[in-house]
Image (cartoon, grey):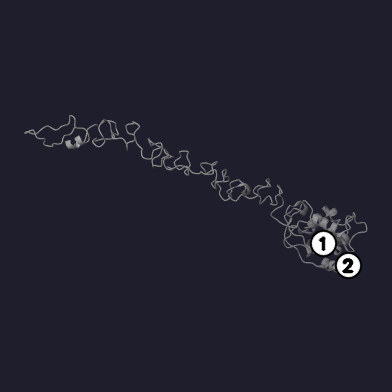
Amino acid sequence: MCLTKYIKILLFVSLLWASPARLTGSDSNSFNFDIDKDGTTNALTDGLLVIRYLFGFQEASLIENAVSAHATRFTATEIKDYLDANNSFLDVDGDGQVDPLTDGLLVLRYLFGFSGESLILASLSVDAERTTSGEIESYVYTYLDSDGDGVTNPNDAFPLNPQETVDSDGDGVGNNADSFPTNPRESVDTDGDGIGDNGDEFPLNEFEWMDSDGDGVGNNADAFPANVWEWEDSDADGIGDNSDLFPNNAFESADYDADGVGDNSDAFPFDASEVLDTDADGIGNNADLDDDGDGVADDLDIAPGDASISKALAVNLDQVASIGLGNGLEAPAGPQGVDDGTQRVF
């Protein structure tokens, strides 16, 4: 009884409270309990407007001191027209009638935060179809727009977030913030490459998103995207730098005998003691006494690497004899038949 008396006093004071309203506004196409359309639903504005309307208040007495300073539906005519058009939604207890001391009181109590038994005490019609506090709360909540985004709570996937209303892919991220609103596995694309972060192996690199061989280098930058051991080919010879003993020489990549000369240039790729075979006689230059095969020993050949030049070096005849080239190369005798040791060039 005390609670009922308190509410009746509150109603009486609220109905008499007055001050002018300002601002201009527009109508809504769907009903919710934000009667003055300021983006919020409050007991001392929206709740009071509902109960005054149900008591038959009109003109200034309907809206005085009951319209928010931020209202966009604020004139008595706009408020009345809106409530007239949506009168059936005001039947909160579902008895087929709209009454200030049942439906109006239920709306006002709900907006004041009443719940449970205190919400419905002495405020339900004897013919009410919604008879529990849970049913009343559920009904009123259905026609609230808690975040003021223009979409009622049941139709708003994010009823407390004014920036979001829809979550098309059901991933918990609203469409406005979701870079992939139809893909439940993705919502963010940090590097803006069109690949969601969950599927992007390089979410901070707009030029990469996949690493097929798992070597830490993205496919776009990896010269060998299917080879975990290779990713760069500096000389573009098709051999990765890690395997290429000559990574900056496009003509070489291997050195089987480890002599420092690539196999393609090494006449003896399996013999570390040989590299060249100038006369192609199968004997490496290091072991061949006549590299160019011109018949002049390298030690005596003015051009030991060029078979087209077969002139021997100027030598002492004693030196010639010492290497077995004495026949036909003896020096002529001097005036008294004495070898004068003169050097000759052949």
Q: Tell me, yes or no, whether the two marked residues, 2 and 1, touch with CB atoms within 8 Å.
A: no
Left or right, 73 with reference to 216: right
Q: In which quadrant of the rendered view does residue 133 lie?
A: bottom right
Q: In which quadrant of the rendered view does residue 52 lie?
A: bottom right
Relative to residue 73, is residue 230 depicted above or below? Answer: above
Q: Residue at x 86, y 69 (%)?
A: 6
Q: Secondary structure at mark 2?
A: helix
Neighbours of disc 2 within 10 Å: few (<14), some (14-19), many (20+): few
Q: Residue at x 19, y 35 (%)?
A: 321
Q: Is residue 316 visible?
A: no
Quarter of the figure that contains the C terminus: top left
Residue 165 horizontal/vertical position (percent):
72, 52
Residue under pointer 1: 110
Left or right, 43 with reference to 327: right
Q: Secondary structure at mark 1?
A: helix
Relative to residue 277, is residue 11 depicted above or below? Answer: below
Residue under pointer 2: 4
Q: Which mark is residue 326?
A: none
Left or right, 86 with reference to 25: right
Residue 178 horizontal/vertical position (percent):
66, 50
Quarter of the figure that contains the N terminus: bottom right
Q: In which quadrant of the rendered view does residue 72 lie?
A: bottom right
Q: Is residue 11 visible?
A: yes
Q: Is residue 164 or residue 45 the one in the foreground? A: 164
Residue furthest right as drawn: 126
Residue 125 horizontal/vertical position (percent):
91, 59
Residue type at numbered disc 2: Thr
Residue type at numbered disc 1: Tyr
Mark closer to the chain start, 2 or 1: 2
